[in-house]
Image (cartoon, helix red, strand yellow):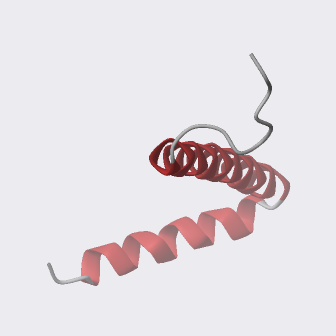
């Protein structure tokens, strides 16, 4: 059976593959972002605390 190379499957299959790859990259990005935030919070605890308080205040004054 001959190799087809990178162009394999139907256009729908390729679209699903691209979407799955996009989701994998996005998940990795979000993991890295969360890790960076945790590191920043450990390195700058005072700034992290004020950010948490500011966020809580915004959420309390937000009207649903």
Q: Residue furthest front?
A: 1
Viewed as shown, does residue 32 lie left or right of 53? Answer: right
Q: Where does the N terminus fall, quadrant-wise?
A: top right
Residue sitting nearer the eye, 18 or 10: 10
Q: Where does residue 46 sit, x and y in percent of width and height? A: 72, 65
> In this rendering, is residue 5 above or below 32?
above
> In this rendering, is residue 15 above or below 54?
above
Residue shown at 66% from the left, 50% from the top: 34
Residue sitting nearer the eye, 23 or 19: 19
In which image quadrant can residue 59 be found? Answer: bottom left
Q: Where does residue 50 sit, x and y in percent of width and height? A: 60, 72
In which image quadrant can residue 61 be found? Answer: bottom left
Q: Residue furthest top?
A: 1
Q: Residue furthest right?
A: 43
- Number of labels in the image equals 0
Q: Residue furthest left?
A: 64
Residue sitting nearer the eye, 30 or 64: 30
Viewed as shown, does residue 26 lie left or right of 15? Answer: right
Residue shown at 57% from the left, 37% from the top: 9
Q: Where does residue 26 sit, x and y in percent of width and height? A: 62, 53
Residue sitting nearer the eye, 4 or 45: 4
Q: Where does the C terminus fall, quadrant-wise?
A: bottom left
Residue shown at 37% from the left, 80% from the top: 58
In which image quadrant can residue 45 be found? Answer: bottom right
């Amino acid at each position: 059976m001959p190799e087809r190379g990178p162009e394999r499957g139907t256009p729908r299959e390729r679209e699903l593959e691209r979407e799955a790859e996009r989701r994998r990259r996005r998940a990795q990005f979000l993991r890295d972002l969360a890790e960076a935030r945790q590191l920043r919070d450990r390195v700058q605890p005072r700034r992290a605390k004020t950010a948490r308080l500011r966020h809580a205040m915004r959420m309390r004054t937000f009207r649903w």
